Image (cartoon, coloured by chain):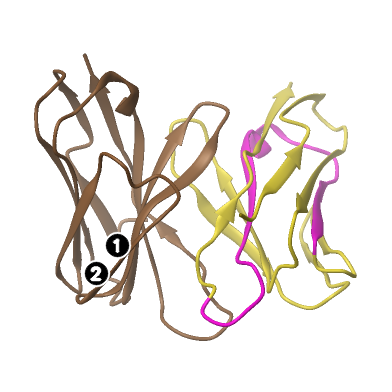
Chain colours: A yellow, B brown
């Protein structure tokens, strides 16, 4: 079955440093979605990328979808304490009727003030 | 998301007991999902439903059953709870159609099986 891997599993950064998490799928994805889960909270949708090579920005967050639609990355510039949480990527495999999301195990970000 | 509610929020039970977790949504979405979250394992799909008459097993359905009572309600049951079902359970919903399958999660139910 489809596998979605994320690295690193944990990342500790000093406030103001940059942060990047990487997501790799064993199969081609029709789209990739990113979610953020704050400590004690529930996953919240951040963004969806659909096109090969797509890049989207949300303030200090930059999301990329690979050319082969099998990998993605999330980059945070100048982290803040509000960025703390676990970031998950998720995607349905390409193909008709594939609406299930397979989630990566997440990258837990800690920001040291 | 306040549009997706789960009850109870916390539950402690004993091995062998039958437990039902409930999920309700006011988003008008057709699709509903149950996930389980364990530390270091991310979110794993238990069951999903595309409408009242359509129920599908996910990655880890053994030991669980579901009921879609209405478009807005999706319940997860543990017929005979066991300790390794101790986890955080999330219900989620999404709208039907297209590539937009963004999922909206409820606040979660923390279940402990002793």
The residue range painted magenta reads A70-97
Asked if the residue at tag 2 contacts the one at tag 1, i.e. Cβ–Cβ closer than 8 Å, the answer is yes
The quarter of the image holding the N terminus of chain A is: bottom right
Whether residue A76 is visible = yes
Farthest residue in the bottom direction? B98
Return the residue nearer the eye: B58 or A83.
B58
Q: Disc 1 marks which residue?
A: B3
Secondary structure found at label 2: loop
Q: Write the residue at 20% across / 55% down.
A: B66
Q: Position of residue A97 (x, y in %)?
A: 51, 79
Q: Position of residue B71 (x, y in %)?
A: 20, 74
Q: Disc 2 marks which residue?
A: B26
Q: Position of residue A33 (x, y in %)?
A: 64, 62
Is B89 situated above or below B65? Answer: above
Return the residue nearer the eye: A99 or B61.
B61
**3D distance between C-alphas at marks 1 and 2:** 5 Å
State the count of labels. 2
Return the residue nearer the eye: B72 or B56.
B56
């Amino acid at each position: 079955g489809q596998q979605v891997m994320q690295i690193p599993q944990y990342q500790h950064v000093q406030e103001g440093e940059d942060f990047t998490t990487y997501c790799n799928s064993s199969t081609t994805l029709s789209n990739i979605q990113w979610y953020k889960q704050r400590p004690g909270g529930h996953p919240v949708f951040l963004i969806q990328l659909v096109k090969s090579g797509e890049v989207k920005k949300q303030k200090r967050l930059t999301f990329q979808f690979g050319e082969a639609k099998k990998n993605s990355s999330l980059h945070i510039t100048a982290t803040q304490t509000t960025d703390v949480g676990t970031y998950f990527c998720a995607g349905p495999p390409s193909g008709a009727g594939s609406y299930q999301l397979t989630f990566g195990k997440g990258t837990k970000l800690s920001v040291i003030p | 998301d306040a549009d997706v509610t789960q009850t109870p929020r916390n539950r402690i039970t004993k091995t062998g007991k039958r437990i039902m977790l409930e999920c309700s949504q006011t988003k008008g979405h057709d699709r509903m999902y149950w996930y389980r979250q364990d530390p270091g394992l991310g979110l794993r799909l238990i069951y999903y439903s595309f409408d009242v008459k359509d129920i599908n097993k996910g990655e880890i359905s053994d030991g669980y059953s579901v009921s879609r009572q209405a478009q807005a309600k999706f319940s997860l049951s543990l017929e005979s709870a066991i300790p390794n079902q101790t986890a955080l359970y999330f219900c989620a919903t999404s709208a039907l159609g297209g590539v937009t399958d963004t999922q909206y999660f409820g606040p979660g139910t923390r279940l402990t099986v002793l």
